[in-house]
Amino acid sequence: MEKILIIGLLTIAGVITALILFFGSQSSIQEASDQNRGKQSQAGLRAQTMIEILNVRTGDNGTALDIWLKNSGAAEVNLQAIENLEVFLMDSEGNWGN
């Protein structure tokens, strides 16, 4: 009788553990799937934008840059994306600026 009780309790504990693991991993898999979907969407948008620098000039005695850009790609680029661009400055000899 004792063995039947122990086997029954172990079976119930095993089923509960399996359910906890299943539902726990299901939510993390869903989150990873959503993140990958978002990254693929961003990569597709990035591939459809072709930003080209048309002209650059200095302003305020060299402390500011005016940059004219053209998007010749199929996707529209919002202003916030352009404001967040990183700019690397180099002189004509290829030395990086500070």
Image (cartoon, grey):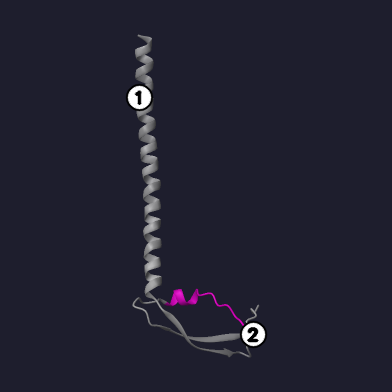
Question: What residue appears at the point 34 percent right and 19 percent down from the top-left corner?
Answer: 8
Identify the main secondary structure in magenta. Answer: loop
Residue position for label 1: 12
Image coordinates of residue 89 in percent, x first then y, are 60, 80
Say the numbered circle drawn on residue 56.
none
Query: Looking at the picture, which amino acid does disc 2 mark?
Result: Glu
Query: Is the residue marked by circle 2 packed among few (<14), some (14-19), or many (20+) residues within 10 Å?
Result: few
The magenta-colored residue range is 79-92
Query: Is the residue marked by circle 1 packed among few (<14), some (14-19), or many (20+) residues within 10 Å?
Result: few
Front label number (1 vs 2): 2
In the rendered view, does 10 fall on the left or right side of 98? left
Query: Looking at the picture, which amino acid does disc 1 mark?
Result: Ile
Point out the image quarter for the N terminus.
top left
Question: What residue appears at the point 45 percent right and 74 percent down from the top-left corner?
Answer: 81
Sequence-earlier tag: 1 or 2: 1
Image quadrant assignment for residue 20: top left
Nearer to us in this view, 64 or 28: 28
Point out the image quarter for the C terminus.
bottom right
As drawn, 63 above or below 43 = below
Image coordinates of residue 36 in percent, x first then y, are 39, 57
Cα separation between marks 1 and 2:
74 Å
Tell me whether the residue at label 1 lies in contact with that at label 2, contact meaning CB atoms closer than 8 angstroms.
no
Q: Is residue 40 magenta?
A: no
Question: What residue appears at the point 37 percent right and 53 percent down from the top-left corner?
Answer: 33
Residue position for label 2: 93
